[in-house]
Structures are given as C-alpha cells and as structure tokens.
Amino acid sequence: MSTTPTSFTASAQPVRVAVIGAGLMGREVASAFGRWFALLDCPVRPELVAVCDVNVAALDWFRQVPTVRHFDTDHRALLARSDIDAVYVAVPHHLHEAIYLDVLRAGKDLFAEKPFGIDLAAARRIRDEANRLGRFVRVSSEFPFLPGVQRAYQLARSGALGRIIEVRCAFLHSSDLDPAKPINWKRQSAYCGAAGVMNDLGLHVAHLPLRLGWKPTSVYAQLQKIYTERPDGKGGVAACDTWDNAALHTHAQIGGHDVPLTLEMKRLAPTETNTWIFEALGTDRGVRFSTKEPKTLWLFRRDKEQWWEKTDLGFGTPFKTITGHIFEPGFPDILQQMWAAFLAERAGLLGDRFGCATPEEAVAHHEIWAAALTSQRDQSVVSVG
Ligand SMILES: NC(=O)c1ccc[n+]([C@@H]2O[C@H](COP(=O)([O-])OP(=O)(O)OC[C@H]3O[C@@H](n4cnc5c(N)ncnc54)[C@H](O)[C@@H]3O)[C@@H](O)[C@H]2O)c1
C-alpha cells in the first residue's frame, strides 16, 4: 500500500553550491542534488550553480544540469563570484590545501573531500584557517549514513555491548588486482600522498570509531606495495609508488580499557568491490555490518546460549524520503543523505541526526596515518598524536 507524502522540501531556501573538480565525485554530487525532491523532511535545499575544472571537456557533462549557470576553468574566477554560498572540492590530494584555503579566504563554506590535505601538516593548516575565519567546514564520508551503520553506531554508543573486546573497521577494493589497469593519480605518492591507500580509503574506516571516541593511542602498521609499476595509458609503463594495502593494529581506550582496534584499507583484496565493514564485539552484545550484505544487520546476544541474530533493514535513512520503506539503499542514496546532513548542520537544523566528518576528525585520522608510516619504517609500535 502506498502512502501520500505529507511533507516536502521544495519550499526550503536554496543554498547555492559550486563544485571544483568535475570528475567522478563532482558528477555524483550533481546527481544527488538532481533528485533532492526524493527527500521529505530536509529543511535545506541545494542548487548547483557553478562548476570548475581545468579540463574543459569535464565541464561538458554538467551542461545538461539546468541550474548550472557558470562554467569555469580557473577556480579563483569561480570563487570571485558573489552568488555562491558553499563549495564542494573534489580534486587530487596534492591540490586540497591550496584550493581549500582559497575557498575559505573567498568567504565561502567548504564541503571538503577526504583526506582533507595530503598529510597531517596540511590538514592542521586547513583546520586552523577554517577556525580563524569562522567558516563552516565538513569532510565527505558517506558510509555512516547507511541505515545499518546508523543502527550499529547507536548500539555501540549506548553502552549495551558491555565491555568492548575488539573492533574491526575495513574498507576493501579489488580493481587494482588487474595489473593491466592503467595508472592514475591515486596510485602516485606525489598526488595521492605518502600515506597512499590510507589517504585514499582511510577516512571511511576511521570516521565511525573516531565519532565514538575510540581514537587509537598506538599503532603497529603492516603496509604493502604490491604492484610497483603499471601501464601509463600511452603505451609505456609508469612507477606506481603508493602503499596498496594497509593493516593497522591499534589500541584504543574504550571504557577505560586498552582495546584492540584494527583498521584495514586495501586496494588488492580479492573479490571485494567497495566493501565497508564495521564490527564491534563486547562481553554482552556485538554488532556487525558489511556493505557486502547492504540491508542486513547482524547482532550478537549473550544469553544462556550465545546468538548471532540477523535482520534485514529497509530504507531507514536519517532524512526521510519518498522511497518505499522495504527498499534497499545504495551509494547514491547515502551520498544524498550526507549532503542533507551537511546542509542541515550548516543551517543549524541538524537536530540529533548524525553529522558529517569534522575537520578535527580529519586531522585525527591523519595523526593515525603519520604514526603508521613511522611504524612501517621502524617496524615498531608508535604512539598516535
Ligand atoms: N567520498 C568518496 O566516496 C570518494 C570517492 C572517490 C574519490 N573521493 C575523493 O574525491 C576527490 C576527487 O576524486 P575523484 O575520484 O573525483 O577524482 P577524479 O580524478 O575523477 O576527478 C578530479 C577532477 O579534478 C580536476 N582538477 C584537477 N586539478 C584541478 C584544478 N586545479 N581545478 C579544478 N579542477 C581540477 C581534474 O581535471 C578532474 O576532472 C579526492 O579527494 C578523492 O579522495 C571521494
């Protein structure tokens, strides 16, 4: 039986958003905005008004988006425009700091992409400038907006798990297993950063434990470079010098105890395509979620007998939508939910919903990667921060 929506967001004041970096993620954001009417109770509405990319061909796709009125190839020209409120920047990591600082100094709010600067020092400088200028800044990390992850987060923070025994957070890819895959900027340290896969996939695994206050205090890192060269796409080969896989064995203080917390980020994990995993086991209860089973939540219960129970969740996203409650959400849905959270929090209307990753959390995740690089170099356990 279908119900008729009783609320809608169309009357909300539009926030004029610009995108710098019209690549993979720039297009995803345009798509999320294009079906904003799917949201029922979002108090704020974005309008994509301007797009910038140094590659003029990348702008062409955006010419079909009716709200876009400015097409620029120089981000400073875009930032000089007065009819822009907030800017989303999705460019290679070596450009984050310079462009993020330009956005802030132009008086615009910023939705940054991870890893929020190429390294820890850059992340700290961006955070400090945002604080100095009083701009609203958040960082992209969409997996916590899945209904299963929201439930896992609520259970973990409620204390119902008992004494936490261990935590595992992972984000696994497999497309790099193909040695014929041509190189791109994400596989080169100069553009991706010395932290390699940790810069690329790391905020996704660190966001939830950091939000729960489970910050690693020490780390032992196992980092791997597996393919050291790749086709350059022009008939030759190019050096591929980033860390491909990272397994970080950390300790975090949880409930006054030292708890093993594992962070895994892998580009060469056989068969895994964008598999995001969170598992927290306690003495009383446990929770397990993976995008491999995107609608399924696993809950452990200790009774006379011990049980893993599973349930299929529906479309229980933080912001309500027109989508039928038994349907399953996917990547475009959680990206839209994340944007709704960004815009609502910016307007002071987030309420008790989950907020996007903060600059402090982004700096904290870089502190873990900096310690991991030292650990790998010295083959030792290293304190974080
Ligand atoms: N949140 C997520 O799930 C997610 C997924 C993929 C990538 N990312 C992040 O998004 C960012 C971009 O990644 P992508 O996959 O979209 O990359 P991409 O290579 O597909 O796109 C980057 C775009 O930036 C443009 N660009 C380069 N220099 C520029 C400049 N000076 N001014 C304007 N545009 C410029 C390029 O021409 C390109 O079109 C990175 O920080 C990456 O880590 C996030």
Image (tube, helix red, strand yellow):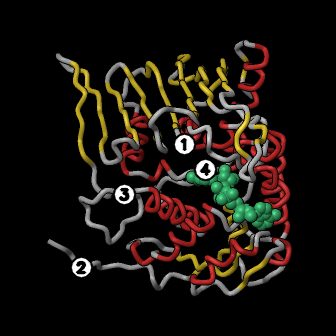
Location of mark 2 (residue): 4
Query: Residue 138 at x, y = what percent?
Result: 65, 56
Residue 333 position (above or below residue 170): below
Examine the image and state in which quarter residue 96 appears: bottom right
| Residue 348 drawn at (x, y percent) | 58, 66
Structural crowding at the residue carrying mark 1, measured as other residues with C-alpha within 10 Å and reported as few (<14), some (14–19) or many (≥20)? some
Q: Which residue is mark 1?
A: 175
Residue type of the residue flagged with mark 2: Thr
**Residue at (29% x, 79% y) in the render:** 6
Q: CA distance from mark 3 to mark 1?
A: 23 Å
For label 4, the residue is 357
Secondary structure of the residue carrying tag 3 is loop
Cα distance in 3D space between marks 4 and 1: 27 Å
- Type of residue at label 4? Ala
Q: At 55% across and 82% down in the image, what residue appears?
A: 13
SS label for mark 1: helix
Residue type, mark 3 in image: Pro
- Report the mark closest to the observer, 2 or 1: 1
